[in-house]
Amino acid sequence: MYYSSFGTLSLIVLLIINLDVLRAKSTLGASPVKIRYKMFLVSISIFFATDILWGLFYQWKTVPLVYFDTVVYFAAMGAALFMWIRFVIDYLNEKNYFSTALYYTGWLILVYQALAVTVNFFVPFVFYFDENGVYRAGVGRNITFAVQFAMFAAIAVYTLAAAAKTAGKEKLHHRAIGFSGIVMSGFVVLQIFNELLPFFSVGCMIATCLIHTFVAEDEKKDQYSALGSAKHKAYTDSLTGVKNVHAYTEEKKRLDQRIADGTLYDFGVIVFDLNGLKRVNDTLGHDAGDRYIVDGCKQICRVFKRSPVFRIGGDEFVVLLEGLDYDDRTALLNSFDRQMDNNMKNGLVSVSGGMSEYIPGSDSDFNEIFERADHRMYARKKAMKAER
């Protein structure tokens, strides 16, 4: 039972931390890495099961069952290593001499294990049991672990060296495999010199936990990236690329909360409206009108480049001023107005703008600031129309 308890613990830990992966019924749409990882988990689970049974059969001194289970043990080990190597190749996603050598090493181990246990039926090449039913290791068993040690050590050296030269997700992947290679190298050595202790299973459990940690971190980053991309699309105006009315609505809620909490201080709003968009649409068509909107938006963004810009209507934009743009608000708006006056004289896109600042203790919500800015924008529009 002492021996089997290690294999049982290893299997339980593996099932707990990878339950979501193992329970997935379909691989449709899954990445090759996830498919390989699941196949590796299944194969290592089978290996753990054979190790558990080995301890039980050996304790009960049922030599025929122990012999059969030992054969399955070495075959399952070869299969698990093969699946781990295939996972590593896909996980690192490299096409070089190392991945090619690793691929053929996986096949070599798998074929060797199959041939070795087959030969063992006729010649005690891998293992045998003496007349007292005591397990004895053969040369083939030591060759198995020696090859594994060389492979894991080589993987650890290569991947950790590569990790030092890379960054981001690639660095993370190389570290995951490098650390697991170090763990397995150490436990393989322990297994070589301790025939009747399950060091290999313990090493596999720790290495698998390490890999799962990195794989899970990958999935989190992918999910956050996908979520961020979806949120960006949902809050971005498709025509101009600035924030849209949905983003504006959310920002209004946050500003109202800050006003209620008393945490909003230096803040201003500028409301912009394009002049003459209807005329452009009526005379030149809506494609020209879209270009007119984009040009007007660019004029706003060029001047107020440190502030969020929102398109809240067909030709209406809002800029929220904080920080440096708030400090320079008067100079920025004056510069913008001068440019619009020149544009209007030269028949280019022109935009009317009106600004208002937040008055602490007087403004109870964002709409009060917006309405003052909106009134000033219409006053500016009226003046520009009269001048035109």
Image: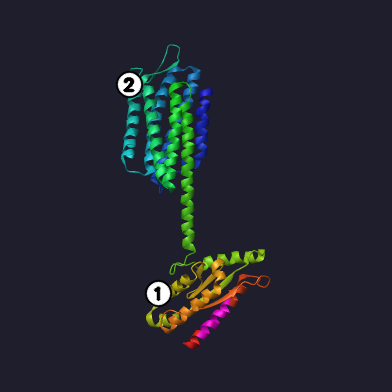
Q: Is residue 377 magenta?
A: yes
382 above or below 153? below
Please, what secondary structure does the residue beneath circle 1 have? helix
Q: Residue furthest top?
A: 131
* Three-letter amino acid code at the position of disc 2: Val
Left/right of residue 56 with respect to residue 259 in the rendered view = left
Q: Find residue 291 and name its label.
A: 1
Query: Which residue in the structure is indicated by mark 2?
Result: 119
Please, what secondary structure does the residue beneath circle 2 have? helix
Range of magenta residues: 373-383
Q: CA distance from mark 2 to mark 1?
A: 78 Å
Please give the count of numbered marks on the rendered protein: 2
- Residue 54 visible at all: yes
Q: Residue furthest right?
A: 361
The mark nearer the N terminus, 2 or 1, is 2
Left/right of residue 249 with respect to residue 124 in the rendered view = right
| Residue at left offset 36%, top offset 28% | 147
Residue 374, percent across and down? Answer: 56, 77
Left/right of residue 165 with respect to residue 357 in the rendered view = left
Task: Between residue 140 and residue 320, name the one nearer to us.
Answer: 320
Q: Look at the magenta stretch and give its main secondary structure.
A: helix
163 above or below 356? above
